[in-house]
Image (cartoon, rainbow, N blue to C red):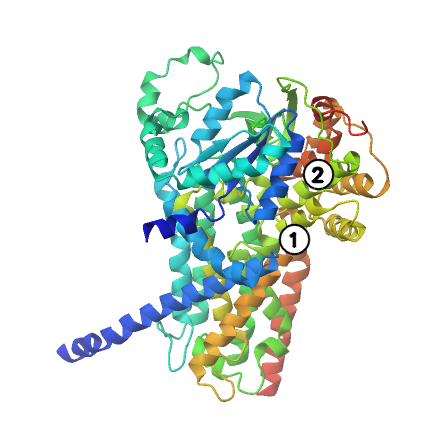
């Protein structure tokens, strides 16, 4: 009885260190997304790098505000929940030997966490009791319906190919060829999903500038800061999950595994954020149709192709 | 240390820019000056550091401006430049005000008297106090905050929807000065709208800039539309278009056409911008045509449509002089 407990206690410092590293990685990924976003918006690189610290200082100095009859508890839960979700996602990613939260169901957990974002963004829009916020919240629900199904089927493809839901096993199964190469449709659908739960790029309508930033309209100060950081962090976390799923995990020449995982996550985050900054925000009703009538059938077809190849190959 | 943080925090203040009736030219110059400094306009008063009202407000709107002012969380600064030439010094003044620690502290202490603070603080108490004299609609239920709840109305498909009266303007960013569009919303769809124009207190003459004003109006509208679409990079380009740089104009125009083709921009808005920038000056839009234009559109589309048509709206032309003059 005492042995397993002592064992657990002995592992505590390592776990604490891992948690700090995961938090640090999320911050670095979020900052990368912010810098890349700034460059895409036409700012110089140094200005883009200074943007996040300056905005953080500005918003930390700014007061908090509330609105008439706001649902304050749910509103704040929605805003402050985004960043922790990103940290949990990062904790699932196998870096080097193991993930901070290893397990045989990593793919399922990643999916479950991205669905939590549905609730958070909607609550963010709902809580402020404002027209712009509600419009943003409902836009997000509509978009979430659109991107989530392709995203779920995209997650199925690597799991079928590796015959496992364990992210570490999925990563190891790509020793010969990255899944991003031979299942490109699933990879693209996954990235669209990442843009969706990070509420950016073409899927940024819920925080659309033309409805006064929608779900963010009534936020100020630290409450706005955590939401902005949370969106960048979610983009980084989504990119980091793509590393074991589609980009061969830690495989790569010369450098240790852990370095490759971080490097790939940084590069993908930067690319994704840049694309998000360059692509126009599309109107909600115009996204639903292509997401369901084009992307979803294509992803299902991709799953079928993967399944047939796996069965015939083995 | 503290001073350094304040300097960093106020390096690029976010300014909520509102156009007063007839304040087009001052507002356009404000946006250009913000571009030159690398400051970004604030998308809503909630996250803004400063409120800038371009032009002179008529007296009835002064109280409304005070409510808007109370929406800024603080530290905050406020200014109302009335001439194009005073815009740079006004922005300098705003930043100096944000950096003035004593002044900001005093402002924060005085905020107990704010219009909206009073609303929010006494949220629960207000329900008992409110005397219902100002509400002569007996059938309207009251929410705890003293807000009027939305009423039901049949939707286009026969289901009942909440009908919410939601005014857009007259004090709204990236919105024609003096336009008040009171919409009735079913969800996010505008089913009805009423137009009111607020007149400027005295007629304002367009500044002698030496550039073709009709085209400048078109580029200004294009910049507003691009900014509303979240594309600040192209919006900056559109604002910087001068008669001497046709290739920049071509780039912006191609971008707008692409956005229209992809459906990011409502077709009507894309077409009117294209006409204004490439071919000729489109026909002016009367108030009835404006109502027709926005009916049945969602709230986002309404903002884009109004922005695209802004230089052609009857009220804007009346307030700031004809584009062709």
Q: Residues within 10 Å of mark 2 (few under 14, many from 20)?
A: many
Q: At 41% across and 49% down in the image, what residue appears?
A: B7
Whether residue B169 is situated above or below residue A275 in the rendered picture:
above
Q: Relative to the observer, which residue lies in front, B2 or A70?
A: B2
Residue A44 picture location, percent across and down:
58, 60
SS at circle 1 = loop
Q: Quadrant of residue B184?
A: top right
Figure check: A279 above or below B22: below
Tell me, yes or no, if residue B276 can be seen here.
Answer: yes
What secondary structure is found at the residue carrying circle 2?
helix
Q: Quadrant of residue A2?
A: bottom left
Viewer-side residue, A8 vs B259: B259
Q: Identify the residue at image location x=42%, y=73%.
A: A93
**Callout 1 environment at 10 Å: few (<14), some (14 to 19), or many (20+)?**
many
* Residue B12 numbered tag: none
* Chain that bears disc 2: B
The residue wearing badge 2 is B221
Query: How far across and down, in percent of the image, does residue B278 sit?
Result: 83, 44
Q: Position of residue B133 (x, y in %)?
A: 42, 10
Q: CA distance from mark 1 to mark 2?
A: 18 Å
Q: In x, y percent, where is residue A158?
A: 54, 75
Q: Residue furthest left?
A: A2
Q: Which residue matches tag 1?
A: A280
CB-based contact (under 8 Å), mark 1 and mark 2: no
Is residue A230 among the parts visible in the rendering? no
């Amino acid at each position: 009885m005492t042995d397993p407990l002592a064992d657990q206690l002995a592992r505590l410092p390592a776990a604490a260190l891992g948690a700090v590293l995961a938090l640090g990685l999320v911050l670095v990924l979020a900052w990368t997304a912010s810098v890349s976003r700034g460059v895409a918006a036409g700012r110089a690189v140094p200005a883009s790098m200074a943007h996040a610290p300056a905005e953080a200082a500005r918003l930390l100095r700014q007061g908090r505000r509330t609105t008439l009859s706001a649902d304050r508890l749910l509103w704040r839960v929605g805003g402050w929940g985004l960043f922790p979700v990103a940290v949990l996602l990062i904790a699932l990613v196998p870096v080097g030997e193991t993930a901070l939260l290893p397990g045989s169901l990593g793919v399922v957990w990643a999916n479950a966490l991205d669905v939590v974002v549905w609730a958070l963004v909607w609550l963010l829009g709902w809580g402020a009791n404002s027209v712009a916020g509600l419009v943003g919240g409902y836009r997000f629900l509509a978009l979430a319906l659109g991107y989530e199904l392709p995203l779920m089927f995209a997650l199925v493809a690597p799991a079928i190919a590796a015959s496992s839901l364990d992210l570490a096993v999925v990563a190891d199964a790509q020793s010969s060829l990255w899944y991003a190469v031979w299942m490109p449709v699933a990879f693209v659908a996954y990235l669209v999903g990442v843009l969706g739960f990070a509420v950016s790029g073409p899927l940024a309508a819920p925080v659309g500038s033309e409805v006064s930033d929608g779900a963010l309209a009534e936020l100020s100060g630290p409450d706005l800061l955590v939401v902005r950081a949370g969106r960048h962090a979610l983009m980084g976390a989504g990119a980091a999950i793509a590393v074991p799923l589609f980009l061969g995990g830690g495989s790569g020449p010369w450098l240790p595994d852990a370095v490759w995982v971080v490097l790939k996550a940084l590069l993908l985050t930067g690319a994704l954020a840049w694309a998000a900054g360059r692509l126009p925000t599309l109107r909600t009703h115009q996204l639903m149709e292509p997401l369901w009538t084009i992307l979803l059938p294509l992803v299902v077809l991709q799953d079928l192709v993967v399944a047939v190849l796996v069965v015939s190959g083995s | 240390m503290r001073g350094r943080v304040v300097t960093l925090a106020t390096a690029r203040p976010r300014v909520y820019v509102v156009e007063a009736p007839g304040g087009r030219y001052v507002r356009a110059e404000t946006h250009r000056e913000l571009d030159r400094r690398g400051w970004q306009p604030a998308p809503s008063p909630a996250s803004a550091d400063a409120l800038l009202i371009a032009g002179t407000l008529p007296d009835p709107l002064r109280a409304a401006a005070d409510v808007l002012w109370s929406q800024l969380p603080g530290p905050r600064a406020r200014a109302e430049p009335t001439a194009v030439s005073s815009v740079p010094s006004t922005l300098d003044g705003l930043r100096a005000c944000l950096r003035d620690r004593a002044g900001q502290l005093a402002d924060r202490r005085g905020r107990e008297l704010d219009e909206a603070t009073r609303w929010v603080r006494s949220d629960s108490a207000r329900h008992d106090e409110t005397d219902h004299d100002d509400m002569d609609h007996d059938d309207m239920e009251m929410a705890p905050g003293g807000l009027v709840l939305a009423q039901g109305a049949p939707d286009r498909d026969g289901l009942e929807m909440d009908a919410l009266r939601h005014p857009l303007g007259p004090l709204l960013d990236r919105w024609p000065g003096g336009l008040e569009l009171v919409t009735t919303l079913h969800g996010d769809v505008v089913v009805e709208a009423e137009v009111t124009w607020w007149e400027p207190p005295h007629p304002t003459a367009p500044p002698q800039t030496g550039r073709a004003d009709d085209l400048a109006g078109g580029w200004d509208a294009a910049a507003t539309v691009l900014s509303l679409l979240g594309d600040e990079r192209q919006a900056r380009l559109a604002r910087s278009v001068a008669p001497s740089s046709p290739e920049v104009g071509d780039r912006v125009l191609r971008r707008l056409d692409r956005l229209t083709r992809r459906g990011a921009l409502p077709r009507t808005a894309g077409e009117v911008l294209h006409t204004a920038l490439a071919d000729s000056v489109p026909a002016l839009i009367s108030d009835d045509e404006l109502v027709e234009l926005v009916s049945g559109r969602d709230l986002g589309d309404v903002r884009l449509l109004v922005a695209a048509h802004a230089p052609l709206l009857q009220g804007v032309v009346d307030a700031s002089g004809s584009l062709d003059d």
